[in-house]
Image: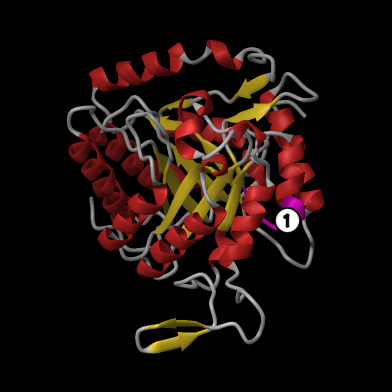
Amino acid sequence: MSSSSGSSVTISTLSFLTPGNFLDDDPYSGLEDTLQLFEFGERLGYDGAWIRQRHLEHGVGSAAVFLAAAGQRTERIQLGTAVIPIGYESPFRLAEDLSLADVLSRGRLQVGFSAGTPPHADLIGDLVFDGDWRTYDLSHNRISRLMENLRGDFLGDADTVIQSPGNTQRPRLQPHSPGLVDRIWYGAGSSRSAQWAGRNGLNLLAGNIVTGETSDDFVTSQLALIDEYRSALDPAAPARFALGRVIVPLDGADRATRERYRRYAASRHERTLAPQGPRRMLFASDLVGTAEEILERLHADAAAGQSTELRLELPYEFHRGDYEQILHDTARLIAPELGWRPAAAPALA
């Protein structure tokens, strides 16, 4: 199936993913802008607000810490991370951090992971690990271990207890947050990773990058990945699947901003024309245009018709004012035409 095949797109869940940028000499202002963007999205009725986790960059290095803060600034919106590279993490210690953040948010975390050798490993691998990290298991098994910790099984045998002031208890990860293990996502870009996510019952994040294993066409490859995932799922234990696209509506932007948006899309167009690099990475085209044009392109995207959950992926290069305009136009002019309704009465005109 090619990208020219049409689809009927219906959206019931609308989220956004933001990079969490900040300036080198003023990280607070950028992080505060991102927290305010989460608040803005909640007021618009978005169902989810997601942050990228990025190491050595001007972005959020600890999603658990950021989402704990976001949980105190919001009341309803789901709080996600896409994605945490599991290779740098201790499956037990990270489970503790995520469980604590989930309890503080009253059960709103949605946690995405990736496996394999994490980014910048040659620079920081030796700083993260004791011993030769190149011999460590950085595979999907690390996520499986974290999920086992999140299930909260007691440690030791039935008679094992630990003592703390005023308390005797059976030991397990604390605080235990029941249900968090069912809100784990995997960012899959290959058939192998999609199959693993399905077999293990994880929710699936599919975005604007996929491996061209059998085709040079992005949508054809992404549809194959979705099929692999669904065929591996246990029918008795359904999971969620969310699709990400870069969407930049022009409607609410001024003339200079519209031109800047168009230049951004043009600068990234060439990478969508053919597979990139030895892994044959395929990139979706950015959806930059009027709301009417974006709706037409979404309906022509066969992969978009496979999910009722849409994740708006915000560009790295933009600023808070741009992001607010994009979120506003999408929530007002695009998503309602796809059947979405805001989760709460919007507070903004």
Q: Is residue 219 left or right of residue 322?
A: right
Q: Quadrant of residue 136?
A: top right
| 139 w.r.t. 176: above or below | above
Q: Is residue 89 left or right of residue 143?
A: left
Q: Position of residue 233 (x, y in %)?
A: 77, 56
Confirm whether the magenta stretch covers residue 117: no
Confirm whether the magenta stretch covers residue 200: yes
Q: Position of residue 341 (x, y in %)?
A: 44, 57
Q: Position of residue 334 (x, y in %)?
A: 44, 42
Q: Specify whether residue 339 is in view.
A: no
> Residue at position x 71%, y 34% from top?
190
Q: Nearer the viewer, residue 210 or 278?
A: 278
| 23 w.r.t. 347: above or below | above
Is the residue marked by circle 1 packed among few (<14), some (14-19), or many (20+) residues within 10 Å? few
> Residue at position x 69%, y 15% from top?
278
Q: Nearer the viewer, residue 88 or 12?
A: 88
> Residue at position x 41%, y 55% from top?
79
Q: Which residue is mark 1?
A: 200
Identify the image quadrant of the N terminus: top right
**Which amino acid is tagged 1?**
Asn
Q: Specify whether residue 218 is in view.
A: yes
Q: Nearer the viewer, residue 51 or 139?
A: 139
Residue numbers of the magenta segment: 198-204
Q: Nearer the viewer, residue 67 or 325?
A: 67
